[in-house]
Amino acid sequence: MPDRFIESHIRQLPLFSRIPAEYMPWVAEAFSLLRFEAGDFVFKQGQPAAGLYMFVSGRGQLIQTDNQGQQQRIGMVEANTYINEAALLQYIQETASLQIVEPALVLFVSRQRLKEVLLHYRVLQDYIGIHVEPESKPKTEEFRGQRPGEEVLVNTRRHWWALVRWTWLPVMLAAALIALALAVAPAGGVSLGLLALAVIVPGLVMIYIYVEWYNDHVIITNQRVIHVERVIHTMQISISETPLTSILQVNAHYVTADPFSRLFDYGTVELRNAGDAGNIELTIMPNPEGIQNLIFEKRDEMSNRQQRRQRDSLRADLERVIHGDVDMDVDEQQQTSEPSNPTANGHTMQRGINTLWKTSFMNQNGEMVYRKHFTVLLRDFIVALLWFMVTGAYFVGYYTVPSLNNLGPAGLAIGVVMLVAGVIGAYWADWDWRNDYYIVGHDTIRLIHRRPLWLQNEEDRVLLASVDNVQSERNGPLQALLDFGHVRISLIGGDIGDEKIFKYVPSPHRVQQEITRRQSVLMRRAEEDKERRRREEIAEYISVYHETISSRNTEVDPTVSSLFEPKENPPAPQRHAPPDNVRPPNIPRARRDGG
């Protein structure tokens, strides 16, 4: 977890020297602290270079092997020096092996981890001088929007009975057309045409039914549940997403009114959250009880894994404190993984040409800002344009039609008022589009509607931690063609109709992914903070315990203690503080193979 120990050393690296202090915790997220013993290999010659290494303490020697197998030492790596900075910029191979000769603490940042941090906090790219772009689609991606490390447990569609139960419709159409062909003209062109239609029309209907069934599916991962519904004839798509941790109740039951429900093993699965608006109902699902058990098993597995991780971390800290290896300094650990906003006003935006007409961009606080789609602006401008055309027609009529010309100055004033109204309408449309924001931040979501002149601005703010369910939807051919729609955000405890809505945003599915990704990061950091506070409490208890024991040992009767007091007191063993008098965090033991 980022703390002062890591930050105090990475400030010495020239690559990160230009980064402001308030951004340094973001960079520290990319680093890990490793411990090596004498004889360990950090890396070996010929391996792909993984990233940059900085020695906090200890020493290592660089050994190079020639074509004849002869080894020679070509250099040393001392404390407060670093190696392999080029590996952060390009793919290279190690030209020598690095072996530890004295026990060492090493800060390490991999090329991939630094890339992830730079993608998440894009403002750092300008200070470091490394510009990276996200990959369009991971090779191992099993569905659109899959996160790194996310495991797909179930990717299923509705039960096959949901498809088969509609086959009666094309069969009846085929039978009706064949009967009509035989009744009208048993042998002739009309009969052949009807027989052809008896094949084509039912076939097209069956294809439509199959595609409707195929496009709807449910994805259950080790992090969330995703429900995708598509309707072909309306070109509607709805994607609902709920984290596993938000699911409080899973109901699975067979349909009692349907005799085939138990026979073919399908039913309804209801995912209930803290509020009605975030509930998901999955109908005609295969093996509903299996899906129910899977969700609960995965939730229990996540909880048990987290508890084991916490116990291992606490056990390591306790061993370090008890054996006197490292003191847990509570004051030094009271650091947050998210620095404060660099500006006092959270509404400050990046201005200028780069963001003036953009529908999505990241502001200087690292928040994602979204505007409505261009079609909203175009729609309002068309209304203003039509008004200008009416105004122009009025002026033409004023000077050409005698009845209007007889109005005199009053008629001219009417035309001027119409012109001013059109200008105000166009200005209002532009202002309203450019100053309506949907902002997804690190902790909050804000819906901002700014109005010109003396009219009051509106702002709605919700906490990311209170988000229960996020749903993206596109309705109609225009939204499907231009890729824009709505994003509905259901809150914990909220009823149907209380959702917060991002209206007419471009690529609503990407907006949904950004919200759920930031929510996942926030939940992870909340767990880390909770674990950190627990460790601090235990460290405080141990500190008080040692102080109590020490005070009791000193409160002994002098007449008694003098009997057991040795004539010469041996010198107390000396403990050496870590470098820079900064206490290191829990340090994982590196493997001896250097892997």
Image (cartoon, rainbow, N blue to C red):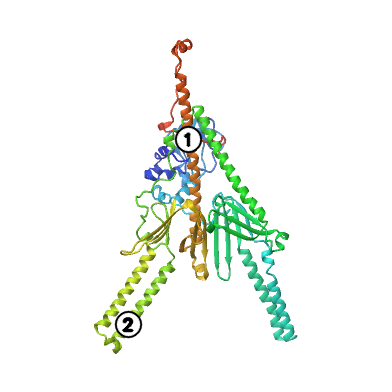
Residue 559 image position (x, y, % from top left)? 45, 11
Vertical relation: 46 (above or below) 252: above
Q: Which amino acid does label 1 sit on?
A: Glu
How far apart are the two marked residues, 2 and 1, measured between alpha carbons? Answer: 79 Å
- Where disc 1 sits, the SS reads helix
Residue located 45% across and 14% down the image: 557
Q: Name the residue under label 1.
A: 537
- Residue 221 vs residue 583: left or right? right
- The number of callouts visible is 2
Residue 475 image position (x, y, % from top left)? 52, 68
Q: Going by the picture, which residue comes out furthest to the bottom?
A: 402
- Residue 462 vs residue 69: left or right? left
54 or 19, which lies in front? 19
Name the disc covering residue 394, or none.
2
Residue located 39% across and 46% down the image: 340
- Residue 97 vs residue 411: left or right? right
Closer to viewer: mark 2 or mark 1: 1
Residue 383 occupies which quadrant of the picture? Answer: bottom left
Circle 1: is it few (<14), some (14-19), or many (20+) Cα within 10 Å?
A: few
